[in-house]
Image (spheres, helix red, strand yellow):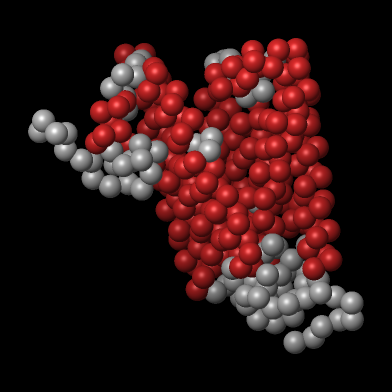
């Protein structure tokens, strides 16, 4: 294995010639700047319409942007893995962005942001730049480490078993998330279901099958990233995503708002697993 003078390289995961740490830092820096620009554009759009929910649509697009920038910025890299990571990210990101855009169209500002707007008063327009748009840019960039690090790695110069396993885990997650979103979308589209709790399809086995699908997507991408030198530390990506989904803006905030609008949701909680799909529990009176 060759080490060039002045380079700080170390083989962590995988075999063969390393890409330079300086090159990796440069790629990460450009991607972070691009995400800040993207989110700043979203903030500008949100000002005249007084609706920061547009950030939801930019979330998936930000990952797509990061994947393709990494693809073109990488001086080296095994093309098979580059295309694999980039296309998987693109399929997921575009689907999510389109779904959220359709879901949010004409619905007004997300109630969570609306409350924040009222509490912040006239300061919200500038607060939202830092605490909504730029904060999400930072989270996005950290989570996207798992799709940035594999791009410039020239070794292994073939698709490995871990690439296959990671793709398989990603595929299961993508299918679960897509089906769960579609099932919920169809349920909400029926006006007769207003105020009711959806507990059919995948939602019979998990209160948040879409989040579980996303969880699998990011752990699958990590298995691909761990193939390459320095790939082990991208475990921060699925860990951060898991914490966001289960402890931050995912399950806790979602369920807090649902319980106020749907009285039957408490019984649904008692019967149904929160995250990992499993058979529903029996009620105490059954």
Quarter-wise, where is residue 176 in the image? top left
Looking at the image, which is closer to me, 210 or 65?
A: 210
Residue 85, visible in the rendered structure: no
User: What is the tally of numbered marks visible in this picture?
Assistant: 0
The picture places residue 31, in percent across and down from the top left corner, at: 77, 49
Residue 49, picture quadrant: top right
Left or right for 60, reference 69 = left
Which residue sits at x=82%, y=51%? 30
Residue for point 46% across, 53% down = 216
Residue closest to the far right: 5
Q: Quadrant of the N terminus?
A: bottom right
Q: Does the image show residue 257?
A: yes
Q: Residue furthest bottom?
A: 1
Q: Is residue 205 above or below residue 269?
A: below
Q: Position of residue 81 (x, y in %)?
A: 63, 66
Going by the picture, which residue comes out furthest to the left?
A: 286
Residue 158 spot, x, y in % from top left: 61, 75
Measured along the vertical axis of the image, is residue 86 above or below residue 96?
Answer: below
Whole-percent x and y of residue 179? 40, 40
**Residue found at x 64% / y 37%:** 59
In the displayed orientation, state which residue is furthest to the front.
119
- Relative side of 12 to 174, left or right: right
Is 224 left or right of 122, judged from the image as shown?
left
Taking 278 as reference, is 256 left or right? right
Question: Which image quarter is the C terminus in?
Answer: top left
Quadrant housing residue 37: top right
Q: Residue at x 78, y 63 (%)?
A: 24
């Amino acid at each position: 294995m060759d080490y060039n003078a002045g380079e700080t390289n170390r083989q962590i995961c995988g075999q063969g010639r390393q890409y330079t740490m300086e090159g990796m830092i440069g790629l990460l820096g450009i991607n972070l700047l691009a995400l800040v620009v993207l989110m700043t554009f979203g903030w500008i759009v949100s000002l005249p319409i007084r609706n920061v929910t547009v950030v939801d649509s930019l979330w998936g697009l930000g990952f797509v942007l990061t994947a393709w920038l990494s693809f073109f910025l990488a001086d080296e890299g095994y093309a098979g893995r580059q295309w694999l990571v980039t296309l998987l990210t693109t399929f997921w990101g575009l689907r999510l962005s389109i779904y959220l855009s359709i879901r949010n169209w004409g619905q007004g500002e997300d109630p969570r942001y609306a409350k924040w707007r009222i509490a912040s008063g006239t300061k919200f327009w500038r607060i939202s730049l830092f605490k909504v748009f730029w904060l999400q840019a930072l989270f996005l960039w950290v989570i996207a480490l798992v799709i940035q690090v594999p791009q410039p790695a020239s070794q292994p110069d073939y698709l490995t078993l871990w690439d296959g396993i990671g793709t398989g885990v990603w595929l299961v997650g993508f299918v679960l998330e897509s089906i769960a979103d579609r099932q919920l979308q169809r349920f909400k589209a029926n006006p007769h279901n207003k105020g009711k709790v959806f507990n059919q399809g995948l939602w019979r086995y998990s209160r948040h099958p879409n989040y579980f699908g996303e969880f699998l997507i990011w752990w699958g991408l990590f298995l691909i990233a761990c193939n390459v030198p320095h790939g082990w530390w991208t475990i921060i990506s699925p860990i951060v995503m898991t914490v966001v989904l289960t402890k931050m803006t995912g399950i806790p905030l979602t369920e807090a708002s649902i319980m106020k609008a749907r009285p039957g949701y408490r019984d649904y909680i008692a019967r149904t697993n929160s995250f990992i799909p499993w058979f529903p529990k029996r009620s105490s009176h059954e």
